[in-house]
Amino acid sequence: MSKPNDLVQGTLDLLLLKMLALEPLHGWAISLRLKSISGDVLQVSEGSLYPALHKLEQAGWITAEWKQTDNNRRAKFYSLTRLGKRQLESEAANWQRLSSAISHVIQLSEA
Amino acid sequence: MEHWWFTARLRLRSILRRTRVEQELNEELQFHLEHKIEEGIAHGLSPKEARYAALRAMGGLEQRKEEMRDMRRIHWLTDFLDDAQYAIRSLRRASGLTAFVVVTLATGIGMAAASFSMVDGLIFRPYPVPQPGGVVTLVSTSHDSSFDGFSYREYLEIRGKTKSYGGVIANAEFEAVGFSAEPGGTPRIRGGMMVSGNYFHVLGVEPRLGRGFREDEDQAPGRNAVVVLGRDFWKQEFAGDPSVLGRTIRLNGRDFTVIGVAPETFPGMQLFVHPDFYTPLAMAQVFSTNRQKDFFEDRDDRELNVSARLKPGTALKQARNELALLAKDFEREYPELNRSRGAAVHTQFEMRTRDDDANWKFIVVFAGLSLAVLLVACTNVAGLLLSRARARTREITIRLAVGAGRFRLIRLLLTESLVLACLGGLGGIAIGYGAIQFLLSFSVPSELPVTMPFQMDARVLLAGLALSVLCALLCGLAPALQSSRADLVTGLKAADVDVPGRKRLWGRSVLVVAQVSMSLMLLMASFLMARGFQHSLLEGTGFAKDHLLMVKFDPRLVQYSPAQTQQFYKLLAERVRAALGVRSAALTQNPPLGLDGFDGVAFVPDGFEMPRDRESFTSAMDTVDEGYFPTMGIPVLRGRAFLTSDTGDAPRVAVVNEQFAKHYWPGADAVGKHIRLDNSTGASVEIVGIAQTVKYRQTFERPTDFVYMPLAQHPIARMVLLLRSTADPLELVKSVKNIVRALDPNLPMLETRTYEDLYRYSAVEGPGIGIKLVGTLGAVGFLLAIAGLYALVAYNVSRRTREIGIRMALGAASSDVVRLVMGKGLVLVGMGTVIGLAMGFAVERLMNSMLFNAGGVDIVAYVVIVPSMFLVTMLAAYVPARRAARIAPTQALRYE
């Protein structure tokens, strides 16, 4: 199993949803985008990407459509659904709460 | 909600368009892979290296796919579909076995489904009203009957004084009524029922058209002539015309206004009859059958069935106590009418399984037997599947060896038996449907349509499905468990190997013993029934059945007064007696073994010290005229039959049967003794004759008490004319018609037929259906058991072919081999026979107590069945044994 060990559990979903909220993308583009946005900090194995997308699709948060790419090949483009938008909002809010709480803890002076 | 709907659609897509989804999965991953390879090449790798690198980065394509499939969470289903597909393929290869198994299961499931439909129809199907569980039935109880009705007065008091119910309703018996749509038309017979004004309201039945009765329409006797039509009647007679509301129809000569039509969903509360119309109780004068009693006033005119709807939250026990107290009050206030009379509240189930009804008992016995057949079928199939599993040892061990989980394997094998059972279930439903249609095809020759409450409905289909699944488990589980336990090493080494040990054979032996015993029991049951019935037919009825024509009359249909009715019958009898071809003629309220029940009579034998808690005894009775005994050929043993001199003004007389005389005056002459009607102060009636005891209700009944009263002294409106002819009785119909027409052209002749016709239905064919049913079960069970036994022995032989070859090579004679192979079969058959005998004996007791009311053991049944069963089963063991003994040793040794 290729769990995204280096990602906090569930963050991959958030990242994917956010990315697809910006524009519809196919899998390859997503993997490139992931790499370029997060640099080497967030390493997502390419293998775990598709199961994750599949899960989001089965949950009804994203939907897929076969379309032509720029260089005229057929690819599966994912886009956010209305449900996915809601999910993204709630997960983003969660993330904000969590990270601010954690950074708050870290910033406590040791004295 | 939206979420659920969305994902369900996705799941459905991944189920229904599996290949498509898989293909897309492939394509998507391929797309990624190609880009990755291009990227690698761009970085300077060779195409081959780039491809490897890309695959590595993906972490294995197949694993990803598998993961993605898991994401769809339909694994269990796709696996199941795969298994089913595989099962169908492998079953198609073994088509002979499949066909045998499917037919076997179909027979078993079909029988069980048909009997379920009967049990359901007679016992379990709820009333066709909203919240049927809250509807209870109130009955009056006495020494002689636990299921009496209540009188109108009693009903009103129960209704007023009880607090447990949301409403108390009453209905009179379903009754033949003369109906004509136009005032002038000749009345035809239809079935109607009087109900209380709150009937539809309390039951929660909303009329389809118009309205139900209002309370005030059921208060003043004879005031509101209104009628609610039944749904079928409305469709048949009025072609579903909605303008029927407000129309006038004529019932028993009186005009009624149609105010409503009952809904589709409400065929009525009765099992066997569906009322064509409902009228208020207050119209009783138009319909009441009993002229001796006043429906509205007499507290012992107990004609009403009383039901009630329990208030929510009221316990049944509460209601019972309340009614019991009320019954005590009745007894205190009216000691002479209600002495030792109690009351009880029964649920629907209790009413349907009442003690005095034979139908449901027969059906329950039948259902038990058909379950036994199903069990035999299942054991047969289980045995076959065991053999098949053995032949597949190698396949299964290979599966295990390459890493199939045991659970997964069991699932595969169970799926196979499920496929088999579902096919069997489909066939079974077809067979069950056929059986039900067969039952429905028997029409009851009565003037009112009788509907059998059996049908193939959703409940029966569901039961069939459940039975199929149960069968799959019953016959699939053991083989699946056993074969998945296979020993890998030996299993792979030899193609055909049994795990050493007794366990496997033990299971199979149990199957055979179970089959033999079960089918023996079935055979015994059907044989006993057939013989018991045959015996009762041979015993004879005690009267002559041939050359009799019967015609029923009901002058109330044309509004005759009691005096007119009497006059009509007198003239009718006189004139038909004078007609050509008539040897003798008689009038009777009911012919013996007819379809309508006899009335009862309450009496006190004169000079008899009644027990303190009893007011009277009861007996069945018939009202006849002076021609009855000679016409029916019933001998009057002592005293005299009725005479024309026994008129309404003469002293009252009665004829009793021998059984009655022996019962009340053992060792003394009953002629000249008196009985008092109703109670010890009632009218005195002299017993003037003793008639021979005959069969009254069924040919297999025990001798029962019976009283005859003369028509002139005990007027009855609805009588049957019996004519004994010199030639074909049907030739008399014309002259009877002319005579009746001369008396009154409007009076309909009902149920004109020969008595033999009636007898054939009610005494021969009716019970014959039951015997045929059970006989079929017995035969099917027996055949299945033989097939099972044969298969087992043959299987044993084939398994031991090599061993037999060695034995014969070493010098064993073929007779030794036969003995060896048969020995085991013999033991099993012996054990099965003993157990089957015990069960058969138990069934005989049960049937005697439930159906035939005869004591004693039918020796012939045992003498015929047991040895023949033993012989046939021995033959089933002998044939394969004989074959084994004929095998040439060289061939046997080469046998794998």
Image (tube, rainbow, N blue to C red):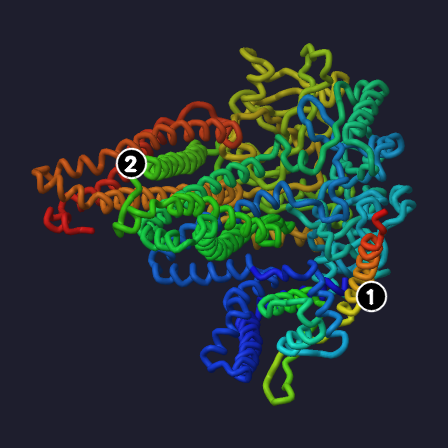
Taking the image as shown, residue B770 lies to the left or right of residue B89, namely right
Mark 2 closeness class: few <14, some 14–19, many ≥20 residues within 10 Å: few
User: Is residue A44 shown left or right of residue B662?
Assistant: right
CA–CA distance between discs 2 and 1? Answer: 68 Å
Q: Position of residue B53 (x, y in %)?
A: 51, 74
Q: Who is closer to the viewer here, B60 or B773? A: B60
Residue B337 found in image quarter: top right
Q: Name the residue under label 2.
A: B868
What is the quadrant of the N terminus of chain B in the image?
A: bottom right
- A51 and B358: which is toward the camera: A51
- Vertical side of B406 occupied by B308: above or below: above
Q: What residue type is labelled 1?
A: Ser
Q: Of label 2 and label 1, which has the lower sequence position?
A: 1
Q: Chain for mark 2?
A: B
Please name the residue shown 83% across and 48% down the image: A110
Residue with the mark numbered 1: B243
- In the figure, residue B256 lies in which quadrant? bottom right
> Which residue is depicted at the point 35% across and 35% down?
B513
Q: Mark 1: few, some, or many residues within 10 Å (few <14, many ≥20)?
A: few
Q: Residue B541 in the image: state x and y as whole percent.
A: 48, 33
At label 2, which amino acid type do we have? Ser
Question: Judging from the image, what secondary structure is the residue with disc 2 in?
Answer: helix
Q: Position of residue B549 (x, y in %)?
A: 54, 46
* Residue A81 visible somewhere in the drawing: yes
Q: Where is residue B441 in the image (x, y as percent from the top left)?
A: 53, 54
Judged by depth in the image, the label closer to the viewer, 2 or 1, is 2
Residue at image coords 85%, 51%: A109
Residue in the foreground of this view, choosing between B881 and B326: B881
Which of the numbered marks, if any, corresponds to residue B592?
none
Tell me the element at label 1.
Answer: helix
- Chain letter behind tag 1: B
Q: Is residue B9 visible?
A: no
